[in-house]
Image (tube, grey):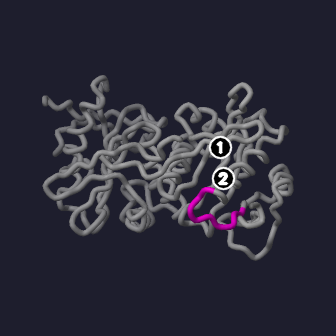
Amino acid sequence: MTQGLVDTPVIKTERLTLRRPDMSDWPAHLAFSTSAASAPLDGPVSPQDAWRIFASLTGHWTLKGFGWFTMEDDTGPVGVCGLHHPPSHSDLEIGWVTFAPAQRKGYAVEAARAVLAWGWPQFPDAPRIVSFIDPANTASEATAARLGATCDGEIAAHNPGCRVWVHRRAAA
Amino acid sequence: MTPSVADIPVIETERLTLRAPRLDDWPGYAALLAGPRSAFIGGAYDTASAWGWFASDLAHWAFFGHGTLWIETRDGGETVGQTSILNPPTWPQPELGFMLLDGCEGQGYATEAAAGLRAWYYRDHPDPVRLVSFVHPDNTGSAAIMARLGATAQTGLPCPFDGYGVYVHPAPEALQ
């Protein structure tokens, strides 16, 4: 027998709980990924592609032992944030997506700070953790800047439409 | 820590072992989905999409208690392909599928593995329903496997892929 799910931490922040995605999150993912609100992330996509994106978050945990968390506030799932390294990417990435109804509350910064604090010790040998961001996605660039990440104009190898933001390893 | 809620079985058939997907299955899967034989499953797929399917098909186990297993020969431990019962919420019902790596066709592995997974599902899944398979109209190899599995093409059934045949497998009771 192999575990279909690896043990996944639950991280609490001031306003959010970060936990493993489950099927109760699917309606919120589907609504976001198939709507115009996902345009900064190359959306909207078909329901089938929305499923692939959503379910692969969980598969990444099983395959690699780390992955994406659902961001949940007192209303339910409001986005995702996590660390991943799919084979098409050059570097370990921290990513965040806040669903439209919960944007502009600082949730992505709050979640990503907690995920980085959890993530750095998991990857003591990682040369860097990055975020790949489309320059048109000014909200995401602002989040990266508030996290202390910097961008010198490097273009993402897998996507010429994205630039590489580099996060600093925490002193702690 | 969150407890594990889904264990992935190991299934033994006469010549084959069906076991959980692993990261070292990825290169073969990526090559298959980038190649010409993936046309029967909507391909070819780029690396990012192929990884998405690889990871999301595995996630089925966590969500639904069924999913993809990889196929190895019991004699030699060679990985020859995969078989799966998948049911994304965009599909009408669970589908039994199979895919062999290049050079591994023609030995009855797909039939044997799919029959083994189907038998496990009907016997051990807590809530089994009658399975179907979606087959590309030009995929004569899969159509022949359907016949060997006792599945029959039926018209008028919902299918997520335009123009594909829907094959209905024997009901759980019929295989007891």
Q: Which residue is mark 2?
A: B120
Chain hosting mark 1 = B
Vertical relation: A158 (above or below) A14: above
Circle 2 residues within 10 Å: few <14, some 14–19, many ≥20: some
Region in magenta? B124-132
A165 relative position to B117: left or right: left
Q: Amino acid at mark 2?
A: Trp
The lab-note entry on whether marks 2 and 1 share a chain reads: yes
Vertical relation: A108 (above or below) A84: below
Q: Is residue A170 magenta?
A: no
First in residue order: circle 2 vs circle 1? 1
Quarter of the rendering containing residue A92: top left
Quadrant placement of the C terminus of chain B: bottom right
Residue B109 showing in the rendered view:
yes
The x and y percentages for residue A148 are 17, 39
Q: Main secondary structure of the magenta part?
A: loop
Chain hosting mark 2 = B
Q: Which residue is mark 1?
A: B11
Quarter of the rendering containing residue B77: top right
Q: Amino acid at mark 1?
A: Ile
